[in-house]
Image (cartoon, helix red, strand yellow):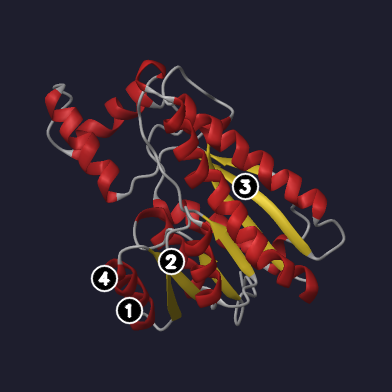
């Protein structure tokens, strides 16, 4: 399927590694000009270089989206974009008893307000041009919360709400706004963490042995495994494309049937 992304310009925040990197590479593979964002210059440049080595078109934008000044730097470096993927975020697996009000404020600033900063900078241009896509990356914990990580889970509910609210504001503009609520994502850091946990708990020594225990213990789902980065990136690419023009205000779960 041709997603008709050739020539579209896309900014993926937090794309110097992990899921953001996978999204940036998939959008580039579909023909989009990708702006890779990060705070580590070497890692960010390496992702852009990899995209160009594979025949794609990529530039970089450096900056801390947790500040107004940093967000402005990123928006200026990115220039006018057709697709904004708000992927940058922070995860801290601590429970209620370990949280202070400042912890809530910090993660809300990074996971929610940073997205608002980029929306304020880049979406007015989309509206003026009559076409655009805004995609928030959130988590299924936004609507399937547990007793742990309440501050993180609340930010994901806010991200989903933000996407819906923005879609109402953008009605009849040609710009859509959606959220993707992700389940587990098997990025390298997660795999290493689970391998260590599995070996410590006697689940086995290899990933094939450990994965089913990890899924059943931490995040049961109907598929029985952890989602792969490219599976999320494929959905982002579709939502970013002209073919998804009738989807807006939606939160799409991709979680193996959690």
Quadrant of the rendered structure where residue 90 is?
top left
C-alpha gap between disc 4 and disc 3: 29 Å
Instruction: Note whether 100 is above or below 97 in the view shown.
Output: below
Q: Residues within 10 Å of mark 1 (few under 14, many from 20)?
A: some
Q: Which mark is first along the chain, 2 or 3?
A: 2
C-alpha gap between disc 1 and disc 3: 28 Å
Instruction: Note whether 99 is above or below 170 in the view shown.
Output: above
Q: Which mark is residue 42?
A: 4
Q: Which residue is mark 1?
A: 49
Q: Which mark is residue 1?
A: none
Percent x, y of residue 72: 54, 67
Q: Residue at x 59, y 57 (%)?
A: 117
Q: Which residue is mark 3?
A: 179
- Callout 2: helix, strand or loop? strand
C-alpha gap between disc 2 and disc 1: 13 Å
Q: Which mark is residue 37?
A: 2
Q: Residues within 10 Å of mark 2 (few under 14, many from 20)?
A: many
Q: 90 or 175, which lies in front? A: 90
Instruction: Note whether 106 is above or below 239 in the view shown.
Output: above
Q: 150 or 182, which lies in front? A: 150
Percent x, y of residue 250: 70, 45
Percent x, y of residue 88: 46, 53
Percent x, y of residue 40: 30, 64
C-alpha gap between disc 1 and disc 4: 10 Å
Q: Residue at x 56, y 55 (%)?
A: 235
Query: Is residue 192 left or right of 190 when viewed as pictured?
Result: left
Query: Is residue 202 left or right of 163 when viewed as pictured?
Result: left
Q: Is residue 33 visible?
A: no
């Amino acid at each position: 399927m041709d997603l008709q992304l050739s020539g579209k310009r896309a900014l993926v925040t937090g794309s110097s590694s992990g899921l953001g990197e996978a999204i940036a590479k998939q959008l580039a593979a579909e023909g989009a000009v990708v702006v890779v964002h990060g705070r580590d210059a070497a890692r960010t440049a390496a992702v852009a270089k990899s995209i160009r080595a594979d025949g794609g078109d990529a530039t970089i934008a450096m900056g801390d989206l947790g500040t107004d000044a940093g967000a402005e730097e990123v928006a200026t470096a990115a220039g006018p974009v057709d697709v904004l993927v708000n992927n940058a975020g922070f995860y801290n697996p601590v429970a209620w008893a370990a949280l202070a009000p400042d912890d809530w404020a910090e993660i809300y600033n990074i996971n929610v307000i940073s997205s608002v900063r980029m929306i304020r900078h880049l979406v007015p241009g989309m509206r003026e041009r009559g076409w655009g896509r805004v995609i928030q990356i959130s988590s299924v914990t936004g609507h399937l919360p547990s007793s742990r990580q309440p501050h993180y889970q609340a930010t994901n509910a806010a991200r989903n709400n933000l996407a819906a609210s923005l879609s109402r504001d953008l009605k009849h503009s040609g710009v859509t706004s959606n959220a993707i609520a992700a389940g587990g994502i098997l990025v390298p850091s997660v795999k290493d963490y689970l391998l260590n946990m599995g070996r410590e708990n006697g689940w086995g020594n290899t990933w094939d042995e450990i994965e089913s225990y990890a899924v059943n213990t931490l995040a049961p789902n109907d598929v029985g495994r952890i989602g792969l980065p490219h599976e999320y990136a494929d959905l982002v690419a579709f939502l970013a494309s002209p073919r998804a023009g009738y989807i807006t205000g939606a939160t799409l779960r991709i979680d193996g049937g959690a």
